[in-house]
Amino acid sequence: MNKTIIVSNRLPLQISIEQDQLNVTPSVGGLATGMKSVHADGNGLWVGWTGITDEELDADLKKEVDAKVKDVKCKAVGLTQDDIDQFYLGFSNRTLWPLFHYFLEYTEFEDSQWEAYKRVNQKFAEVVLDTIEDGDTVWIHDYQLLLLPQLIKDVKPEVTIGFFLHIPFPSYEIFRTFPWREELLTGMLGADLIGFHTYDYERHFLSSVKRILRLDVNFNEITYHDRIVKVDSFPMGIDYNKFHDAALEHDNPNTEISELQKRIDTHLNEDGDKKLILSIDRLDYTKGIPNRIRAFEYFLNKHPEYKEKVRLVMLAVPSRSGVPQYQLLKKETDELVGRINGEFSTVSWTPIWYFYRSLPFENLIDLYTSSDIALITPVRDGMNLVAKEYVATRTKQDGVLILSEMAGAAKEMNEALLINPNSFEDFASALKKALTMPLEEQNNRMKILQKRLKRYDVEKWADEFFKTLEATNKLQDVVVSK
Ligand code: ADQ
């Protein structure tokens, strides 16, 4: 029986070693939910890194990890500390991540890190090739593994390979600056289907393929050697019901109220007019956090009548703290929040509540359901699932989403207030509009957004990708038999 192998940098697991005791717990992120039907199916397997380096494991512990990982239908790729430094914190997050998000000034082009990237992609290939057989299907995820499709195809031409990129694909003018551009593109072209979140990313990719590799591109099909590679867009959805149902449960009077919710309620009860504005992101320079804080300051100065009436609740999740740009961003954010709170706070009001941590799911729901406005303003973002999660939790169809045009999600969320995140004026007028929007208009916008997100949820996204991958496979048969 043929099997399906999912490959991503990290396995959907949390593994920890405490007092020589190994704990393995499945993590329930969006991707894991989307992959559920594929992975839970009798023959699914997930390949990736466990989060623990080879140096942290002696032979016995490694055996134990492998066995526990196998129990949950996963297979580990062993990575050393040097791999993590050079491949993950290095090439993936100091070259590809900034370049693909248009941060050329942060992009490093280091030969040694490129070598590490190739070496680690090869490590992943070896683990996949060890288990794969003709007729199997592989679905590879994201920018850490751009070379993997070709590494597999070279050895096993009879497997079907899908690749999905979770971040933007930049325009040709940006991509052409990349020193290893041919190798990266041919690495991706080992796939039979390449998926992006939006049509624009797809278009940018096709344009780079045409201009750099000079290949024939017919609409969204590339002829590469004797194969057809299909390129398409699949905007990723969320586990809509999970968020919606959790919000309904939250509204249930019998549900225990969290400490965070009690604090929020106290704030709201102090003065019935107070409004909460929410922002949630990983602490990443692509998310536009300092700009958002400055824009909030601009808003308070422009509309002083809102002082003591609004509060920005800003949740930033620690991320990639081993990369210098992220350390600088943390410092800048701390200072900005401190300065603005120092400048505007009164005895009874602090304009920004800032949390720098990861919160449990229940607390995310507290924040989503209590906020009148979600202010999601990345300067560049492949999709942005937080915007979709906020909408899914609005069980009474109230609330307003302010969303950056630069997020992939904006393409499907026209009923949000879309803004250019570089314009303080846009911020201020969208905030004013959101704060004064009649309930009926909020309802009308929310209803349309919810209907769309419910229909195209993460499982549907995975299904559509898989169906297209199967169809692409048939296309190959036609080409071969011609
Ligand atoms: P990210 O850049 O990580 O993902 P995003 O799409 O917003 O960004 O997803 C973040 C996820 O983390 C959300 O599901 C959110 O609920 C969760 N989260 C946020 N804050 C949290 C907190 N404090 N505690 C716990 N969980 C928290 C990348 C790309 C995006 C793309 C996704 C999926 O950068 O553009 O949308 O992949 O393809």
Image (cartoon, rainbow, N blue to C red):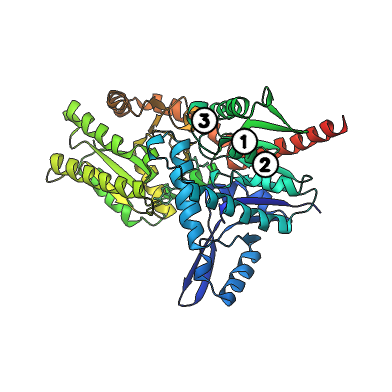
> Which residue corresponds to mark 3?
176
Q: What residue occupies the far left of the structure in this picture?
A: 347
Vertical placement of residue 393 versus 224, above or below: below
Residue behind mark 1: 195
Q: Residues within 10 Å of mark 3 (few under 14, many from 20)?
A: some
- Which comes before the other along the chain, label 3 or label 1? 3
Q: CA distance from mark 2 to mark 1?
A: 8 Å
User: Does mark 2 have its CB less than 8 Å from ligand 1?
Assistant: no
Amino acid, disc 3: Arg
Q: Quadrant of residue 396?
A: top left
Say which element carries label 1: strand
Viewer-side residue, 438 vs 150: 150
User: Which quadrant of the view contains residue 165?
Assistant: top right
Marks 3, 1: nearer the viewer: 3
Q: Position of residue 90 (x, y in %)?
A: 45, 50
Examine the image and state in which quarter residue 200 appears.
top right
Q: Relative to 78, say whether 133 is above or below.
A: above
- Front residue of 345/426: it is 426
Tell me if label 2 and label 1 are in contact, CB under 8 Å. yes
Disc 3 to disc 1, C-alpha distance: 20 Å
Point out residue 134 in the picture as x, y percentages from the top left corner: 80, 50
